[in-house]
Image: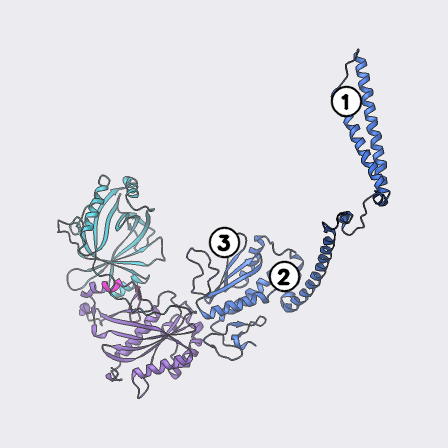
Amino acid sequence: MGVTCVCQVPVVEGKSVQQTVEMLHRKLEQLGAVKQGSFCVDCETYHAGAMGTTGQPTKFLYVMHNSEMPLSCFALFEGGPCLVADPNFDVLMIKLKGHFQNAKGNKVESRGTRFQYCDFLVKVGTITMGSSARGISVEVEYCPCGVPNDCWNLMKEFMQGFLGPHTPELPMVFTAKPDGIYSPSDCSDTMAQYLELFGKVRKQQVAIGSSMR
Amino acid sequence: MEAPPVTVMPVTGGTINMMEYLLQGSVLDHSLDSLLHRLRGLCDNMEPESFADHEMVYLLKGQQGNPFLLRARRSLDRPASPWHLRYLGQPEVGDKSRHALVRNCVDVAASQSLPDFLNEMGFRMDHEFVAKGHMFRKGALKVVVCKLFRMLVPGNTESIEALSLSYLVELSVLAPAGQDTVSEDMRSFAEQLKPLVHLEKIDPKRHM
Amino acid sequence: MADVMSVGVNLEAFSQAISAIQALRSSVTRVFDSLKDGMKNKETLEGREKVFITEFQDNLQSVNRDLNELERLSNLVGRPSESHPLHNSGLLSLDPVQDKTPLYSQLLQAYKWSNKLQYHAGLASSLLNQQSLKRSANQMGASAKRRPKVQPTTLVLPPQYVDDVISRIGRMFPDMTIELSRPNGTSAVLLVTLGKVLKAIVVMRSLFIDRTIVRAFNENVYSEDGKLDIWSKSNYQVFQKVTDHATTALLHYQLPQMPDVVVRSFMTWLRSYIKLFQTPCQRCGKFLQDGLPPTWRDFRTLEAFHDTCRQ
């Protein structure tokens, strides 16, 4: 897979999440992008609650899934190692429930439409937590290239075409490894970016209001 | 780009509640060849797969009694293949009607970052060993004949020393819970190996 | 009969010569006959020997006589006219049955054609030579010294020579790795990996590049059976475009006498894709046009252009 950039697009003032998403869809279609099904990225939070006696801060373990890689399961620590496993990892987490509790209310997911434009894949999703819409995620992937530094300017130019002033900077995950080949088969860098985004969304107040639903 | 559109939603859950049925035994080194010969005749028509694996056993100690145990295994022959993470539940040996040891089992294929990740989860390595041997199949039955090696230097799979002068023989089947007929198949298969090796259901707790 | 005689005195000499040959053969046969029969039964031993020797001498003398006669006649016969442009096949014109087998006229026509063809081919070759010299004048200067070394028949080069040329090119470009394999017979197939940008499969025939296909660095170049997949195109539009341009480059870099220079020029051109995703178009200054980066590279300056910006 190629180089991926995940970012958040703020909701246009005076519009709902749904309306902002539709505006993005229109812009992409004007550009020539074609709708290609839907996508979903979800994230469950587990905390190592049972061992919190020693006074250490509680550690969070995140287990994520991505419809682009339907037979994989991603387990991450914030800023820590990422494990790519098969779906049986979910079963293992049930076995581990004595040590890691699932914080059911903290489940975040982003669902939306997948667009294709030439060699770009664009996924515009609505981020929901519990039952409330919390924001909009945009994922852009440039598939033919594997080195983030090589194609970043090109991707930026593309994103400026429909995100305008909300075009993001080079994601943090890439600045750590300037020249390395970007994980060719798994998508742990993509998942790390979603995790970061979901973390931001989780902390922010339900400011946009629950009027969208 | 001509990738097919993805409409599949993520599969969560995996295969729930798989059981491992297990019989164990051992042979001395000098009778290994005759056992392999016998297995070659009994099992599916294929060349026995030989393997060399490095297994690390991790423990997660919580407040309540038993520590949580996970086994991480990697192939030494094929370093590019994924790691194998295995959870094994408490064995159910008491039931006399069953001819094999039965225990809950979760197999996970995982990426190379597994040891780092387990450490981050709080697991600590308890012990490690190297297993070298051969694997046979007959339908769903799996027969593993392997020798276990102790590692002289932690983490170094080069300097190893055999644990004993014999080979471990394991006959196992993975099946969903409640399919006890497989233990019948296992028993009849074990009968056919009888003079060479006696496969029995062994309670690991008795030897601890 | 009369017109046969009119062809010349030669013919009479011919028939005499033929009978002389017949005479010679029969006299030689007699020699061996008498040798084979051996001595005839006579009263005394001396008598037998005497008769045998005289008979043998007589026979040899007649052989000698016949041979001399043949030699004399052969001088009269003279040589067949060598001035004829078609050499011996010119004698076909003597065939009296012209109408049934018009071999001679056909032969003449074919001869004229092949003459013309040779002439035109010569002209074309000299013209083509001038053209290619002009086009790649910069490379000519560098390789002028090596020119006499080039074999005339470039289609059949020893594999060792091809290997040498390829490995020399591989050493020239550190960011380019070239793997050479020969999956079918002597023709080489190159797998060129350029940085972390692309992989190109180049199919060679001797030192001529037959076909090339370019794929992304992270795409599969091997088919399921583990062989190099030289047919299926890249999944990505950008590399389909680069493949098209590379095929154009194959047609552009042509220099039949110096195929190694062609391969080197092609590789130099291909190497300019190392910054495929990093270079904006030299004309419009943008990275993307219709979702594609600048895929065209100028054959001389190697500058990057969008396909539509290059004119």
- Would residue A79 be found to the left or right of residue C103 on screen? left
Q: For residue C235, what is the image quadrant?
A: bottom left
Q: What residue type is labelled 3?
A: Pro
Location of mark 1 (residue): C34
Disc 3 to disc 1, C-alpha distance: 71 Å
Whether labels 2 and 3 belong to a single chain: the reply is: yes
Say above or below: B157 vs A105.
Answer: above
Closer to us: mark 3 or mark 1?
1
Q: Are marks 3 and 1 in contact (CB under 8 Å)?
A: no
From the top left corner, tell me how far across and down residue A115 is, in percent. Answer: 37, 75
Q: Which residue lies furthest to the top in this view?
A: C43
From the top left corner, tell me how far across and down residue B164 is, in percent. Answer: 26, 45
From the top left corner, tell me how far across and down residue C67 is, in percent. Answer: 82, 32
For chain B, give the colour.
cyan
Location of mark 2 (residue): C256
B190 in magenta: no
Q: Sort mark 2 into few (<14), some (14-19) or many (20+) by Cα contacts within 10 Å.
A: some
Q: Residue furthest bottom?
A: A14
Q: Are marks 1 and 2 in contact (CB under 8 Å)?
A: no
For chain A, give the colour.
purple
* Range of residues picked out in magenta: A75-91
Location of mark 3 (residue): C183
Could you tell me which secondary element the residue under label 1 belongs to? helix
Q: For residue A168, what is the image quadrant?
A: bottom left
Q: Sort mark 3 into few (<14), some (14-19) or many (20+) by Cα contacts within 10 Å.
A: few
- Would residue A86 be found to the left or right of residue C125 on screen? left
Q: Which chain did the renderer colour blue? A: C
Could you tell me which secondary element the residue under label 2 belongs to? loop
Disc 2 to disc 3, C-alpha distance: 25 Å
Q: Sort mark 1 into few (<14), some (14-19) or many (20+) by Cα contacts within 10 Å.
A: some
